[in-house]
Amino acid sequence: MNTPFRICIIALLLPVSALTLTSCKKDTVDPTKGLSTRIQTIVSQADIDGLRSRGMIVNEGSQPPNIEGIFSSSPHTLVSPYGPADTYKVGDTFNDLIIRFTEQNSADQSAKVEIKNAGSTATGVGGFLSGNGNKFSFFAELDFVSGSVTGKQVRLFSGEITADGIKDFYTTIYFKSKNDPNNTQIPVGASRIIKDGNGLASKRTTFRIATVEAGQPTGTESSMGQ
């Protein structure tokens, strides 16, 4: 006598269970996709899309690798000039870039960065990581100094951590503001995309830049080359 009633109860419960399972699947976060809201306060999605269209690598995800260490990009080769007025062209090289990543925090995916590039330095106010596996992107705000010139930069670094350094190393430089009366640096709002010409930013033991050798280009990656 109770059999039809039990069948009805089971039939009513099945759709609820199916909906619950479907909901769980939709709520699953893909660790290989997306950029945090912290990153998007530094660089907008529209700017990221624009940089990608010009050749910049951006590695998304919520589980980046540990990137702490010192690395050297050499030859430091231009991928995309900032615009028609740029006196450097695709394939031109700049003085070696030395990068030091420190104080990485896995809780909020933050870290700090310092860079040196033949007479100019920049120190990270703070930045945030994205990525998955061994691939990462790091978005940072920096205080820039080159002689009497100062400024605020946004820098984006991307690549794949290996035992020897950062494979497929790319970086973007963008000035938010600057104190530059002689206009020696790239314009505010403009950006250059640069990569390691050999495909590997090598590991280093010291955060020290060698003296520029005779015959090497003397322009820094920030300069207009004038």
Image (cartoon, helix red, strand yellow):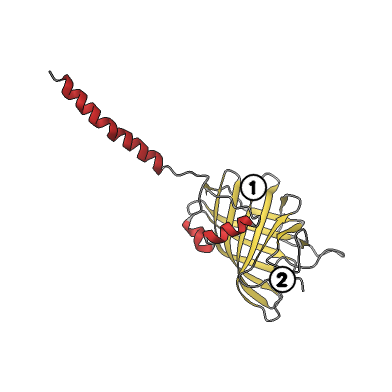
Residue 85 - label: 2
Q: Mark 1 points at which residue?
A: 160
Residue drawn at point x = 12 percent, y = 18 percent: 1
Q: Where is residue 51 in the image (x, y as percent from the top left)?
A: 61, 58
Which residue ends up furthest to the right in the rendered image?
Answer: 214
Total numbered circles: 2
Which residue type does callout 2 highlight? Ala
Q: Is mark 2 on a helix, strand or loop?
A: loop
Mark 2 near mark 1, Cβ–Cβ under 8 Å?
Answer: no
Which residue ends up furthest to the left in the rendered image?
Answer: 1
Which residue ends up furthest to the top in the rendered image?
Answer: 1
Residue 102 falls left or right of residue 85: left
Q: In the rendered view, would you say 104 is above or below 26?
A: below
Q: Where is residue 67 in the image (x, y as percent from the top left)?
A: 61, 51
Q: Where is residue 112 in the image (x, y as percent from the top left)?
A: 58, 60
Q: Which of 177 and 142 is in front in this view?
A: 177
Residue 105 falls left or right of residue 156: left
Quadrant location of the C terminus in the rendered image: bottom right
Residue 128 - label: none
Which residue type does callout 1 highlight? Glu
Residues packed near mark 1 inside 10 Å, few (<14), some (14 to 19) or many (20 plus): many
- For marks 2 and 1, give the CA distance: 32 Å
Q: What element carries label 1?
A: strand
If you read the primary sequence from the N terminus, does the residue marked by circle 2 or circle 1 appear first?
A: 2
Q: Which quadrant of the figure has residue 139?
A: bottom right
Residue 64 falls left or right of residue 89: left
Q: Nearer the viewer, residue 86 or 174?
A: 86
Q: Where is residue 10 in the image (x, y as percent from the top left)?
A: 23, 27
Residue drawn at point x = 72 percent, y = 49 percent: 200
Q: Nearer the viewer, residue 42 or 109?
A: 42
Residue drawn at point x = 65 percent, y = 64 percent: 173
Residues packed near mark 2 inside 10 Å, few (<14), some (14 to 19) or many (20 plus): few
